[in-house]
Image: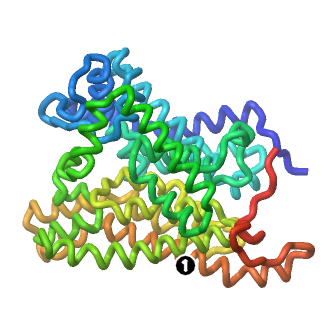
Amino acid sequence: MTRRTPTTTHWVLAALVFVALAAWPITKFMFLFPQDQWQVDIQVYREAGISVLQGRPIYEQMTDPPQLLPFTYPPVAALLSVPLAFVPFAVAAWSWTILQLAADLAIAWVAWYHLRDRAGAWAPVLVAAVAGAFLWTQPVGDGIRFAQINAFLVLAILLDLKRPRTRLLRAVPPGVLVGLAMAIKLTPGVFVIHYLVCRRWREAATAIITATLVSVGAWMILPPASFAFWGGALSDPTRLGPNDGSANQAFRALLLRRGLDGSELLLAWAPYLLVVGVVVFWLGRRAYQQGDWLMEAAVIGLAGFLLSPVSWVHHLHWLMVIVPAILGAAAWRDRPRVVAAAIPFAWFVCTMPFWGVLWKREGREPAVVGDVLVEGNVIGSLVILGLLAWAIHRTDALEPRSQSATPGRRGPATTGARGPRAGVGADRAEG
């Protein structure tokens, strides 16, 4: 009989595996990085916390040279940043890094549940290996590099969509965590659109009401900052940095790098938004109908990256969810899924935009190679969309066969307001 409960040896081995895999990314970003670029985003959050305590204008304050970065999040995030103001910058940065690593381990534990369940006592080792490996990808590694917030948002939304809900969240209505994430950073609002497309009115309303109540609470505490954000800072994309720089891997940035501006930019970007928006929300609805909450989270998480006017690569922290979503429930029996899931992981281990910048800076030929590499993550995000669509279609194609081969399995049922069918993505109840 296979042992299911991890022993102390398994947990110790898991810790060693994670430390071994995390050693280089942590060393590179926490010890070897230039001091003037070290943990720049935690400095932004900390300055916002200091501004709250001192009554400074939050959205006029900049970090120290040479970065000179403004605070770009809603006032709720500034309030949550206050604890960072009570400790030295280095303590805040290291504490944030440790919390990020813990969040990445939690994401791996939740998102890789199919393989984790099969791993039995070796589940901690599997999760440690997965979380450590993803630190080598650009989206997750850059979260450590800049001290970003994305790991926490991904974890919160993932827990909100998870079915069945964990014990700690059974008393929390679905949609609350999405609403909180949306109050902190606006891009999780794509999940509200997804709820509306799927006619999940209660979850959509819960998310909207939660975000509204939290934002109104912040407005009552910080009225000048709230007026500044909702009345001007929100609509100014230049506050996020140079929109046409290679670090911005949104499709709009690709168009800006091609020299488009004004009405030409809008005419080129609008059809992309329409087509990709329709495709991505249709795929999210299809994943919901299949009962596959993990695929649902992966597709809509990707939507935020695809549709935003500004998308830094660390916004694609959803890669930790996308790869297991493509693997599916029975990857050990489906080699094409394993190959498909390896593609986005390998793609984002590479740093194509930086390669492209070097190619162009050194004047190498052909010049088009540098141009393509600079857009590597734009292309990669669309490749991921295609792979997710393929995986959803494969689930539809193989499900009748798997159901006929599995005695006693419930067949597919149509979905309406009652929710998704019982099918290949349905989870077993957790204790």
Residue at the image point whose x is 71% and y is 72% from the top: 333
In the image, is residue 49 above or below residue 243? above
Which residue extends farthest left? 363
In the image, is residue 407 above or below residue 216? below
Task: Mark yes or no: residue 28 visible.
Answer: no
Q: Residues within 10 Å of mark 1 (few under 14, many from 20)?
A: some
Q: Residue 160, how many percent across, how many down?
A: 61, 49
For this rendering, which residue is in front, 295 or 266? 266
* 42 to the left or right of 258: right
* 26 to the left or right of 102: left
Q: Residue 66, how many percent across, how many down?
A: 12, 34
In the image, is residue 222 above or below residue 181? above
Q: How is the image coloured?
A: rainbow
Task: Mark yes or no: residue 87 visible.
Answer: yes
Q: Residue 166, how many percent across, how many down?
A: 71, 43
> According to the image, label 1 marks what residue?
390
- In which quadrant is the C terminus drawn? top right
Quarter of the image where one finds residue 400: bottom right
Residue at the image point whose x is 60% and y is 67% from the top: 199
Residue at the image point whose x is 63% and y is 38% from the top: 14
Q: Residue 259, how many percent across, how many down?
A: 10, 71
For this rendering, which residue is in front, 343 or 289? 289
Q: Amino acid at mark 1?
A: Trp
Residue at the image point whose x is 20% and y is 72% from the top: 266
* Secondary structure found at label 1: helix
* 12 to the left or right of 4: left
In the image, is residue 208 above or below residue 226? below
